[in-house]
Image: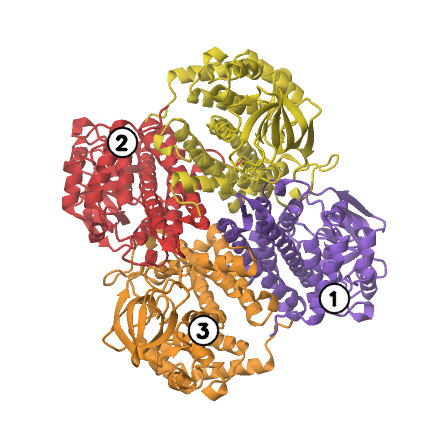
Chain colours: A red, B purple, C orange, D yellow
Amino acid sequence: MDFAFTEDQQELRAVVRAFLARRARSEQVRAGWEPATWAQLIEQLELTGVALPEAVGGAGASFVEAGIALEEIGRALLPAPYLPTVVGATALAATPELQARVVAGDAIGLALDARDPLRAVASATARAAGDDGDSPPLLDGVAPQVLDGALARLFVVAARDAAGEPALYAVEAGARGVRVVARPTVDQTRGQAALHLSAAPAVRLSAPGEGAAALARLGETLWVAQALEAVGVGDRALSETVAYLKERVQFGRVLGSFQALRHRCADLAAELEGARATAHYAAWAVDGAPQELAVTAPLAKAVCAQAASRVAAEAIQLHGGIGFTWEHDAHLWFKRAKATEQLYGTPRALRRLAAERAGLLRAA
Amino acid sequence: MDFAFTEDQQELRAVVRAFLARRARSEQVRAGWEPATWAQLIEQLELTGVALPEAVGGAGASFVEAGIALEEIGRALLPAPYLPTVVGATALAATPELQARVVAGDAIGLALDARDPLRAVASATARAAGDDGDSPPLLDGVAPQVLDGALARLFVVAARDAAGEPALYAVEAGARGVRVVARPTVDQTRGQAALHLSAAPAVRLSAPGEGAAALARLGETLWVAQALEAVGVGDRALSETVAYLKERVQFGRVLGSFQALRHRCADLAAELEGARATAHYAAWAVDGAPQELAVTAPLAKAVCAQAASRVAAEAIQLHGGIGFTWEHDAHLWFKRAKATEQLYGTPRALRRLAAERAGLLRAA
Amino acid sequence: MDLRFTPADEAFRAEVRAWLRDHLVGDYAALGGAGRPGREHEGLDVRMAWERELGAAGWIGLDWPRQHGGREATLLQQVIFHEEYAAAGAPGRVNHVGEQLLAPTVLAYGTDAQKRRFLPGILRGTELWCQGYSEPDAGSDLAAVRTQARLDGDVWRIDGQKVWTSLAEHADWTFAVVRSEPGSERHKGLSYLLVPMDQPGVEIRPIVQITGTSEFSEVFFSDAVTAAENIVGAPGDGWRVALGTLAFERGVATLGQQIGFARELEEIADSARASGAIDDPEIADRIATAFCELRVLRFNALRTLAGDPTAAAGAASVAKLLWAPWHQRLGELAIDVRGVETTLAASGDGYALDGDQALWLYTRSDTIYAGSNEIQRNIIAERMLGLPRG
Amino acid sequence: MDLRFTPADEAFRAEVRAWLRDHLVGDYAALGGAGRPGREHEGLDVRMAWERELGAAGWIGLDWPRQHGGREATLLQQVIFHEEYAAAGAPGRVNHVGEQLLAPTVLAYGTDAQKRRFLPGILRGTELWCQGYSEPDAGSDLAAVRTQARLDGDVWRIDGQKVWTSLAEHADWTFAVVRSEPGSERHKGLSYLLVPMDQPGVEIRPIVQITGTSEFSEVFFSDAVTAAENIVGAPGDGWRVALGTLAFERGVATLGQQIGFARELEEIADSARASGAIDDPEIADRIATAFCELRVLRFNALRTLAGDPTAAAGAASVAKLLWAPWHQRLGELAIDVRGVETTLAASGDGYALDGDQALWLYTRSDTIYAGSNEIQRNIIAERMLGLPRG
């Protein structure tokens, strides 16, 4: 067992962090989606393909590497559709041509239920018997909250097939019957859109009988990705807060020398360390021990999102008045952390799910 | 509106506190029930009759005065059946001869459901039509957890009458069909006993049709009494902890000068101040605004018991190793506070009850 | 101990209620909760007119001496006024700072001339005030004053910056704590000046907050002037006067504030019932807990205001340390009741939030402004518990 | 990053498991969890025999150098041993202090003669040790040592008192930090002495705890003696040696400890299912939360032990600050699942508690002993976050 990142992995983290230090400064993050930055993320850093097979142009590494990127991108709050893209790409194993497009930079939107990603949001119409034949299946449905949906070229849709079974489909953003409506968000560093499907042609991604498993796997990968991103946000919030406390003088002393504040930072650091270990373990489990994800993924999301929220809330408090201004980034961390808690299952719901799956809450 | 205690009330508090400083020192508290102390409480301080009418020998004051005694006795952890006696006495309005016995020092045991004091624990047998006639009603049932039950001369029993309606009865401890079995307790400063009634002759306390209201009133008074006692326990735990922190030197400084500890004490003090105001308001409401008790009593118990528990838990922590020893009193406060939380409705259950009664949680 | 209001108090309550019923109509009634925390800049013209209505009817300066136009109302009558005012849904006051902070300071420390000059404008609702205490690098450390003032003939000349000033662009005057003795440190060498806002030397820049709205401003003084006599107390005695101002905050508005809190909680519970979120036991417990704790806030405020003398030291800090985190938790609850949809902003120009979202974000400031949680804990530890400073 | 155990590790695990299966039988198996926290004095004779069994089979001193009889096992192999040991339900070890604290100290700082004298007794399970660090008025301040020692010819003479000593009445030896330079202060002038317990100058008084049982003792030294050569390190260098001892605590037993935690949690969940308390959503959430957080403890321990170098500074403090309050909350949960009946003590002589009650009370000490929460927060703030001391 080796819990240390390899030298290559450490190098990857350093490169991504250095890139984001240049391209995701506060004013850039606030300016929103920047296609040129995304292009560099694809072309220079090859981040969308990092966990995809070499056969489709990817780097053939594991989700651990994608996780490093997720953590760093979360840390920087880069406004880019990396999370849904790298998660959605894991559902494209049967369609190498679509994976190749992801490697080339096509962003994915996850058309999932924002409360419970294991539920279908659309259904394949019975009138088109396309599930088995030549004509493509047609999807109807609405996903009201698709992260970064307005930037997606491709949607991965959780739907019921014509037989009523769960299945995953891919839908082109530009296809007929597809309508994408951007929606304003509280977390201004990440957009959402509503996806309306009306007899939209789709490509089936999951084999018959395996849809539920594919959807579960997608949801679990999503939770792991959220956990990693949250750890990045929490790490940023804590490290900037600690740096501020070391500088800021009040009552003739550096704020960080006040024991009450030091102890609160220590509690946050301990919680965040636990969350970080959990997120890293979960990132490894995506490829290394997928059978553990049923329990580990929901708990990782629950634990990490909550840690990030607590750190970000304290970051505002510990910054005092300045932390309450629009100008300071503290509110961006806070809003992202809370949105991560809210999207795709609350910490409480996911804790319960994890404990149920572990057999602890099953009725006797 | 005047929230200040009168001079007489302040004098009462001072007298009771001075008495307990002599008669409820740690070693006395640990030695358990001391009849001579109880006798002085009755004869010198006249505390069991403080809220009872002058006609039965009482002082004719209000439950505020009883509340002062409850708070101080809680503060001292005096092992004596004052709480059930003073609460039970409020149910004896229709039986002045029984109230007179309370004034004279007969302790009362509350035969209530320890989880929910509003539920009956016994029932009057149908075979004895005594509810209306000359022969006394006979009670059957078990109250497994009666506070200080082994010291009671008289039990107030929540039962169903022969018609199945809730009613309150009085049962003599020495009567036939009455069996009292002392039970060891975790909080060693307050005993419990199981009360077994088997066709035990009883005196009906509540008029037909008014039993539910009488039982509700008894339960609410009990919650207020618990709240007051808990505030006393919390006040003792906090004040002794603060005193300890002012004396104890570590790392070359008085412990109480460490800001992390000062801030925690401040949080506890704030919570306790809120609880104290609530308990005092509730004590006044028993006689001053009984219509408010339906909401105020359960919330007072919930808030005050929780405050006492938090303070007592922190008292152990802030005392360090010595706070974990049998020799120090911290565990006595801690065990009493927890028992108060557990007995007669948990804080969570009582918060819910209060909110339901206030109409906040009723279904739309 | 008798927690009923007296007949005289009830009569006063009836008088307040009747007046509000008759006068809080039309434009005034249409304001709703405008001007309350998070909405301080709404409907300002109408609210200024409303302030003058209040003044004309004698509802300003309730507790002032009669000789200065007050009613010498008791503490409880002031409480009653604020309760009724809140219960009627009357708009947020525009001159809280003038009436509750500056006026008592002038009454306590001011000259007769100052009383004649400044009290009537407050009493009639015609002169608005803003506060000039906080400075950019000072944070909770009020003594870290760097704004300078020097006496130049018959005027004070002022240079420096204040921050977190409410309603600065509408105020006619500010009271500012300034360093009048060059080279002095901390509490020494400070003076308490009254400065007109409408002059070239005063510049105001709004501070945008995490809600995207602006409730506070920075105020820059560049050779700003005020007449030499506009100093309260002696030169160099400003710290004592400034602390005096803070001490006048007796919390009479607390119970009125709690009526607003109760309304917010009821709206959240209504929303939870309508959506079915109330059936989530965690949500139900959080609503129940908020309800119980709000009652605790009320009992605690009554105990302080209706005079249990043992509750004096640190009572204001206890009240703040209880209500600010309570309100913050309420803000969290407001969006948790609705769930993931609250990640979506309201439609509208720019960054638009609905009421729940605004409450959630705005309440982050409750534990910071007017004495942060940390400052309150320091005060309680020191004054109530007697624990020594580190 | 590869979080699978290697085949070599799995083989080691199989070896441990097989040995335990074959040897943890009869009286040993009957001990159950005896000796675990809260039950440290149970079945001591059998456990001492069991310690000798372990020693004879080479399961003590796993990581010691081969020349001293160890296996030079890796950190992960030690972890595996503790996991299997806990999973098998083997009894609490009687000589943790000797094996995990004293032995590494002697290996690092001791003379060859000390190694020859003291290591074999630990290795074979024949000599038991207890710790002599804490003093009555010191609390968390380990440098506040008042126990005196002076060299008198060929012996050290020791006077003073130690406290919170586990298994003092069964230990053959103690290692004590003493003040050997009269008038010295704090970290200076201390020495690290090895002192035989069985002598007239050593008196032991048990400390009764809030559970009514006694896990610790006070140890009084009144002209107690030990040979001059029984000093580890130089005279006056005791602080460095004592800190070294603490640093040897690498947490290899952590994952084994967590297996015990998981068993406690499962028993609580079983109890909740049996009684129906599991249908109370608050209880269910607390069980779920405890489960998730226990996994976090595991991942955190794996990260530290399997070597993410970025997790080094303060990692032990993070682990302690996470597990101690977790275990305390578990104790609360244990009695809350059962409710009001847990106010009744168990029947039996004197003050008798059942397992849930004992867990509830015993875990109050988890946040105090072996570095209180407060000490851990200080360490994390300083070493991990670099925040300056006050």
For this view, does B227 lie left or right of residue B155?
Answer: left
Tag 2: residue type?
Gln
Residue at the bottom extreme? C67
| Nearer the camera: disc 1 or disc 2 | 2
Check disc 1 and report the residue beneath it. Answer: B51
Tag 3: residue type?
Ala
Query: Can you see residue B336?
Result: yes
Tag 1: residue type?
Ala
Check disc 2 and report the residue beneath it. Answer: A10
- Is disc 1 surrounded by few (<14), some (14 to 19) or many (20+) residues within 10 Å? many
| Nearer the camera: disc 3 or disc 2 | 2
Query: Can you see residue D30?
Result: no
Residue at the front extreme? D153
Q: Position of residue C183 (x, y in %)?
A: 34, 64
Q: Position of residue D200 (x, y in %)?
A: 71, 24
- Chain letter of disc 2 in the image: A
- Eyeballing the image, is D170 above or below C42? above
Q: Residue at x 27, y 74 (%)?
A: C224
Nearer to the camera, D172 or B44: D172
The reply to whether callout 1 and callout 3 are in contact (CB within 8 Å) is: no
